[in-house]
Amino acid sequence: MNSPRYWAIVPAAGSGKRVGGERPKQYLPLLDKPSSNGRCRRCCASHAFRALLLCWRPTTPLRQSQLALAAKVRTAIGGAERVDSVRAGLTALAQDAKPEDWVLVHDAARPCLTDSDLTLLLHSLADDAVGGLLATPIVDTLKQADTTQHVAATMPRAGLWRALTPQMFRFSLLTRALEQARVQNIAVTDEAEAIERSGHASRLIAGRSDNIKITAPEICAWRQLF
């Protein structure tokens, strides 16, 4: 059997409601460049990937040329929610991807993915039947709030991990899992949840804690200090 191939999907059609402002968070400037640039370049530079599907909005405030995209990048129209964009990316790859191929999904708003973490994910899951995701163990103390925003309880953190991206799964398995969630009207927040609800277990790969997600404009400002 031929070795499976690798594809990447970057959902970048979100409006960034939590950040606010007119520009979606994935296009906020980071070191004077759109924060989505780094991951596109990193995935495209890896010889493992056949193509990267950038699922974006046609009304994006930036021109495609400003993203400094490589020839390996394809584009597709994203959806209202992250999961809709991932489905659009899978549909766009359907003519080329084989069932056993790997599909890596990475948030457009996570600009700090390192080459070492990407390599770790690819190598750790190479022979896995399902797939998995980068994640970090929870180290902060967790508080549960009541309806008045007072502490109701301190929650145990043992065994809890913070899900990161990339998340990587077999093409056919991920496609079926997301379609099943759609049919059942389940709003999944990441690919691993869809895989979990379909009856499969995702492997956790310990990644770097600085693989942060931009959820506020000040995060971009903070990164410019380094």
Image: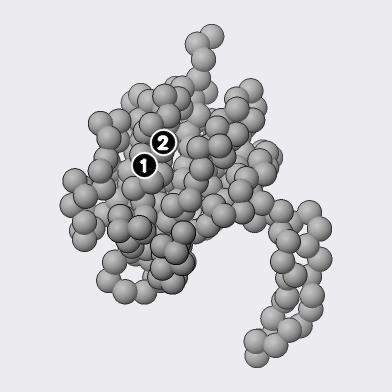
- Residue 133 appears in the figure: yes
User: Of the residues shown, which amino acid type is indicated by label 1?
Assistant: Cys
Q: Is residue 146 above or below residue 121?
A: below
Q: Quadrant of residue 148?
A: bottom right
Q: What's the CA distance linking mark 1 and mark 2?
A: 5 Å
Residue positioned 67% across, 44% down in the render: 206
Rendered location of residue 8, percent (x, y): 42, 36
Rendered location of residue 219, percent (x, y): 46, 67
Element type where label 1 sits in the image: helix
User: Of the residues shown, which amino acid type is indicated by label 2?
Assistant: Cys
Badge 1: residue crowd in 10 Å (few <14, some 14–19, many ≥20): many
Residue linked to disc 2 = 43
Q: Which mark is residue 40?
A: 1
- Residue 65 is left or right of residue 169, and the answer is left
Tell me whether circle 1 and circle 2 mark residues in contact (CB < 8 Å): yes
Q: Is residue 40 above or below residue 24?
A: above
Element type where label 2 sits in the image: helix
Residue positioned 64% across, 30% down in the render: 124
Badge 2: residue crowd in 10 Å (few <14, some 14–19, many ≥20): many
